[in-house]
Amino acid sequence: MKINRSLWTGLLALSSVQLMAQQQLKINAEFETLNDGQKVYLTDFITKRVDSTSVANNKFQFMANADSSTIYIVQLGLQPKENEFFFMDMGAGQVNISGKGSSFKDVAITGSSFVDRWKELDAFMLNRCGGGINYPNELAQKMAQAQAIGDGQALENLQKDFLLYVEKGKSAAKDWIAKYPDESISAYVINAFLLNKIPLNEVKALVKGLGANAQRSKLAHLMLTLEEPKLSSNLLNQQAPDFTLNDEKGVAVKLSDFKGKYVLLDFWASWCAPCRKEMPFVKAAFEKYNSPKFTILSVSIDTEPEKWRKALTDEKMPWKQLLDDSNQQVSTLYNVAFIPMNFLIDPTGKIIAFGLYGENINKQLGDVLK
């Protein structure tokens, strides 16, 4: 926003005050039963900046610079329980929170226009996909509970619900950004419902198609600066390093035994939450493409075999499962710096792709197995 020079210094001063106000985010909250002295935290999800304050007279307040919109998380305490935190795409303006309890359950949230748009998006996703903005987190909590009690059938059903939500969410997200191309919340929609679910170049094209206001979002900037994952050494288009590892029954399995078919070599671990969230996509790929021409081979880097075996029971993955060990260190052979990580190996044993996540798994396999 530019302010023209003027001899009317009073008007100039007023405009400057308005500009400063527009660059601030103010959050006011009042709960009838909040405990005085209770710590509250405000986290910028993108920059990881954390501010804190304390409850006084059942109230708390935050002031933050807001040169562009970003995802903020407001939480009660350092380890909030369910309903003790909420997140929202916020920008310059004001958010008012009021409730009768001691959590964010059933609170009334009002304020600037971005608050109403957030509520509209929540209702839109509920109508189109069967769940609101927070539905994936709710499913993740239920999956963790099912896993904890060993309810494999419930876990499988929840994973199917998750996949269905993701598929519906992609279509709904594209319709939303077509309706609101110049609102900052549309950058959030791309990030939440399309990033890692469609190819990165398509994500960037959608971001570049947003209006100037939406592109000022911190999420928009983040997505435009993302790069495809790179290997620390040039394994792409090279022969996949061969190895032999034992499966859960103690039977030795050799990678080169699978020559003649496409193999998705998948590195994961039972303790890796992103790996477990990615598993529904891997299962869907196996169900769709499993044939004499294709299979999946999973390698866990777990150091506690018991937890690995329990995860196999919980996840019900109907393909070969191997456990890396200190002697082979297969993850080191493949320069695996983080998990989940996977490699697509062609029938000659050559690595032709890596880092396939979300819908990219189906897309890449569909291209090579057609």
Image (cartoon, rainbow, N blue to C red):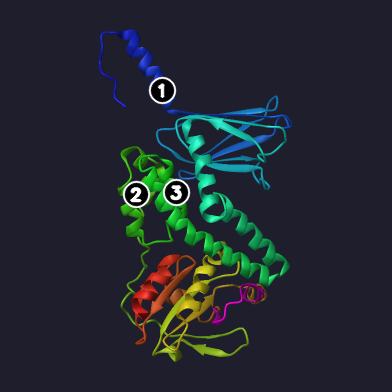
The residue lying at 58 percent from left, 85 percent from top is 247
The front one of 221 and 206 is 206
Q: Residue type at mark 3?
A: Val
Q: Disc 1 marks which residue?
A: 20
* Mark identifier at residue 292: none
Q: Disc 3 marks which residue?
A: 189
Give the CA separation, mark 1 to mark 3. 28 Å
The front one of 148 and 239 is 148
Q: Secondary structure at mark 3?
A: helix
Q: Position of residue 106 (x, y in %)?
A: 67, 39
* Up-down relation of residue 202 to residue 52 (above or below): below
- Which residue lies most toward the front here? 127
Query: In the picture, residue 241 is in which quadrant?
Result: bottom left
Segment colored magenta: 310-324
Whichever of labels 1 and 3 marks the residue nearer the N terminus, that label is 1
Query: In the picture, residue 186 is in which quadrant?
Result: top left
Q: Position of residue 175 (x, y in %)?
A: 41, 51
* Up-down relation of residue 282 to residue 251 (above or below): above
Q: Position of residue 212 (x, y in %)?
A: 31, 39
Q: Position of residue 164 (x, y in %)?
A: 53, 63
Decide: few, some or many residues near mark 2? Use Cα within 10 Å; few <14, some 14-19, many ≥20. many
Q: Secondary structure at mark 2?
A: helix
Q: Disc 2 marks which residue?
A: 207
Which mark is nearer the camera, 1 or 3?
Answer: 3
State the count of labels: 3
Residue 72 visible (yes or no): no
Q: Residue type at mark 1?
A: Met
